[in-house]
Image: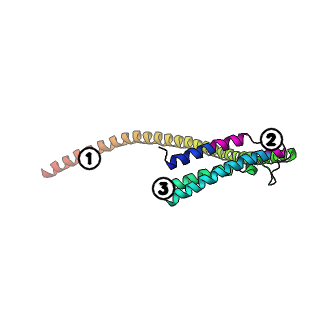
Amino acid sequence: MKTPISSWDNDYARLARATSLLRADLPIGTSFNSAQQWQDKASSIQIGLDRLFSHLYYHESHLSLSPAEVSRRRSLLEGLKDQLSYESVSGADYSGRLPSPAAALRQQENTIDEIAIGVDGIKKRTKIINEEIDSHLILFGKIDNNTELGKEVLEDVTRRTKSFRRENRKTLWRLHLIAAGLGVLLFLLILMGLF
């Protein structure tokens, strides 16, 4: 058994296919008849869309669909409706005429100009990024040089510390010997003073 919602879905799918086929069959050239035939087909699809809009309103008012589902389906229908706009698809003016080759070339040139502006912007950003990278490389070079200098200073301090410790060991032994000699002398003096 078909539910009203599945019937709506089937009708929408049929209209979406018809719209897609209609867009693929867009007339090329300046023939008024082919443009008129296209508009007639679009009008019959528009009638189907209007019927789906009314069914959707019915389901919304009777709460048979959630608000989110109604909103999703409404945006689907509006998307199809926008695709049926002959002006947005073909670039035709409101009288239904197709653009002349000169107008099409102008439109193409405008598009190329926009692309060129985008490429120019990308070039400028790339140049800025390259300059930033160069400045970072210079900083890294300075950091590397400073690290080498720091390493040399640290090695020099280490060498001097080792040398100082070696010299102090000799002096420390001398101090120990002197202290021991003074201790013995003091002991002897104390012994002599007692007798």
Circle nearer the N terminus (1, 3) = 3
- Rendered image: mark on residue 28: 2
The local crowd at label 2, few if under 14, some if 14 to 19, many if 20 or more residues have their Cα within 10 Å, is few
Over which residues does the magenta segment extend?
Answer: 16-34
Circle nearer the N terminus (3, 2) = 2
Task: Give the residue drawn at x 16%, y 52%.
Answer: 193
Q: Rounded to the nearest whole Å, what is the CA distance between mark 2 and mark 1? A: 119 Å
Q: Is residue 59 above or below residue 108?
A: below
**Nearest the camera: 193 or 79?**
79
Amino acid type of the residue tagged 1 in the rendering = Leu
Label 3 sits on residue? 66
Judged from the image, the secondary structure of the residue bearing numbered disc 1 is helix
Q: Position of residue 92 (x, y in %)?
A: 79, 50
Q: Position of residue 125 (x, y in %)?
A: 70, 48
In the image, is residue 49 part of the stretch drawn in magenta? no
| Outermost residue toward the front in this view | 1
Task: Give the residue drawn at x 75%, y 42%.
Answer: 26
**Nearest the camera: 172 or 189?**
172
Label 1 sits on residue? 182
Q: Is residue 120 visible?
A: no
- Occupied quadrant, residue 34: top right
Q: Rounded to the nearest whole Å, what is the CA distance between mark 1 and mark 3? A: 105 Å
In the image, is residue 26 part of the stretch drawn in magenta? yes
Q: Main secondary structure of the magenta part?
A: helix
Q: Rounded to the nearest whole Å, what is the CA distance between mark 3 and mark 2? A: 43 Å
